[in-house]
Image (cartoon, helix red, strand yellow):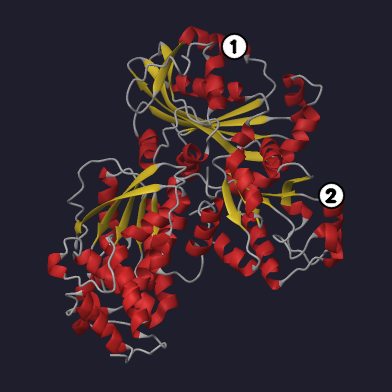
Amino acid sequence: MNQTMGYKINDVENRIAEIFSEVLKRTVLITDEVLRENEPKWDSLANLEIVMHIEEALNVRFSPEQLELFKSKSSITLVVLKAHGIA
Amino acid sequence: MLDVPNLVNAQHTLLNKKLTRSEILKQKIRRARFGRKTVRIYRNHNFELMDPVLSVFGSFSGFEIETLIGSYDESMSFNEYSGERVDADVLWFDFSRFELKSDALTEFVVSRLKALRKFSNAPIIICDHPSVDYVDFNKSLVDSVKEVPDIFVFPISEIAQKMGDGFYDHDRASHFGTAFHTSVFLESARLIGLKYLPAVLRPRIKAIAIDLDNTLYNGVLGEDGPEGVRMTEGHRRLQECLVKLGESGILLSVTSKNVDQDVETLFSVRQDFPLRLEHLAGRQVNWGSKAENIKKLAEAFNISPSDFLLLDDNPAEIGQVVADIDLIDVMHASDDADITVSELNMFPGLFSFGLTNEDLKRSKDVIARKHRMDQQKGQSVAEYLEQMETSLAIHLNEADAFKRLCEIPIKTNQFNLALQRLSATQIRSYLDERNAFVVSFSLSDKLSNSGNVGALYAKVADDFLVVDELCVSCRALGRGIEDFMITRALDAIIQTIPNEVSGIRFYYRFGPRNQPAIEWLRKFTQDLIACESDCVKGDSSGLNMVHYPLNKFRSRLESYRKFPINVLLQTAL
């Protein structure tokens, strides 16, 4: 079980948007949806970078089952929010 | 213009104990002093996780690393080798995937390393086994690779030991393409990028110029006085670390804006300092520029200023030194000396895979050099050499000195004629092949035994003796005997060749630091070599060649008949 660190929804969404921007090398806003199937730069390596950055930045660890859900920014955000008990 | 604050920030981020991937990848360091290095990766699990972070660590170490990552190679077949020349091979294998016991695994891995060595000249870095159950394999691996030249073991087992159960992440192995936890990749990239690749790709740092105030101790000598400056536990550990580096052959020196007499008093009064004056090969304490001080120390040590590492707590001082000495290594000393110690242990260019007797003699040799220079004043070269009872030993094809023969072309920069940076495999071929020769020479006098100070790598081709490489350690320079040593070394080879050669050909290359070698060749051949601007480059590598007729060589040899140096020739032929 992941410990909550007092994260707020906005903190999580901001950080995930920053990580997507860094990894995909373009500006991704909180309000943007990013779908893996539509994103050429979101290949398997970028996927692993996204996982590692989020785990490090937001103190989570994704299970193999959760990793299967990495299809969109919003689905990832939901997993993280649930892990922190704020969704 | 180097961005010093950026460099200092990068140092504290990358060499720090706690690594984060995002902080590492944010670092932008542009100081590829040692140029582009191509590293071929053989692997049986994910390497791509390491690649971008290794690139950042490589940049800090002074390289622009280009990796050629092969496909997954479960059986160490190395089938993808395609003949391109690389600067290093890294074998990123998870040996826990091999279902072999220790003995069988050792036999298999060593046989594969020998196979790889047959077609690759590059230094090879291989991981050991992470598991404590394979301690015997790891020990055998270290012992076995001594049979094969230029192979170095990266002890991932030490990372595994520190991380314990956190080392493996089997649950997610299919997603990540590796059973290692992702944090293993950060630590491995740091060690490979900062310690192990620099150990094989760049010359070792030869000297450290140490600042005093708020670096070696806490406080300011001029304000606090010798009794008032504080030796914290961290500073004590830092001084002990510096002493150990000095014992490993790195020359220690002090450069400080202080009064020299005060510094002498400081070391006399503070018996609690692990670092003593006798550990220092030199010091420059004055109010002048630190760059000029380092240049004076370099001259005293007979090395280049860029062979130094400056350790200083003041980023402005660091910036001024770098502005004047472009290629120098610099490290910021933290307020917390424990941080400085842990960063010093990671600093690229300090680690060496193995030390030779010559490394360990270096400091004593430098001190002896100063005595020699004092004695040389007012004497001719011949008078001075006779007084010093100088002896030269010439060793022809001495396989026992293989390690040193491999080091010399890598470590020498100033007297390095062709800058070929011969690999261990290439040097082995000079020892093994007919009509190929390696001559090394050792010097001693009544002040010190300098050990092996130079080597010449040559072969007979088309009726000529062709010198592919000639290197002389800076420790042997300045005594006026380079010409004599090299002439006698060449003669040692010519005496063994059954058919007389018609001349000697030297390969040479113009580099940023090897003017002493070029100047020697110019005088030796009586100005036959071209100027750098006029040089017709034989190939894109920048190698040139000059021909020196045998009759001129014989005249030179004759002129040395009564030279007052005892010469001992030892040949393995």
B33 left or right, relative to B364: left
Q: Is residue B434 left or right of residue B531?
A: left
Q: Which label's residue is closer to the chain start, 2 or 1? A: 2
Three-letter code for the amino acid on which mark 2 is drawn: Val
| Contact, mark 2 vs mark 1 (Cβ under 8 Å) | no
* Residue B287 location (% of width, % of height): 78, 44
Residues A39 and B248: in front is A39
Query: Which one is in front, B111 or B338?
Result: B338
**Do the residues marked 2 and 1 share a common chain?**
yes
Placement of B478 over or under A29, stated as above or below: above
Instruction: Please determine whether, in this image, residue B215 is positioned above or below residue B535.
Output: below
Chain designation of label 2: B
Q: Position of residue B104 (x, y in %)?
A: 26, 67
| Observer able to see residue B180 | no
Q: Quadrant of residue B282?
A: top right
Q: Secondary structure at mark 2?
A: loop
Badge 1 marks a residue whose secondary structure is: helix
Q: Quadrant of residue B173?
A: bottom left
Which residue type does callout 1 highlight? Glu
Residue A67, how many percent across, how many down? 21, 79
Residue B214 percent coordinates (x, y): 72, 61
Q: Which mark is residue B558?
A: 1
Which label belongs to residue B259? 2
Quadrant for residue A38, please give it.
Answer: bottom left
Q: Which mark is residue B402?
A: none
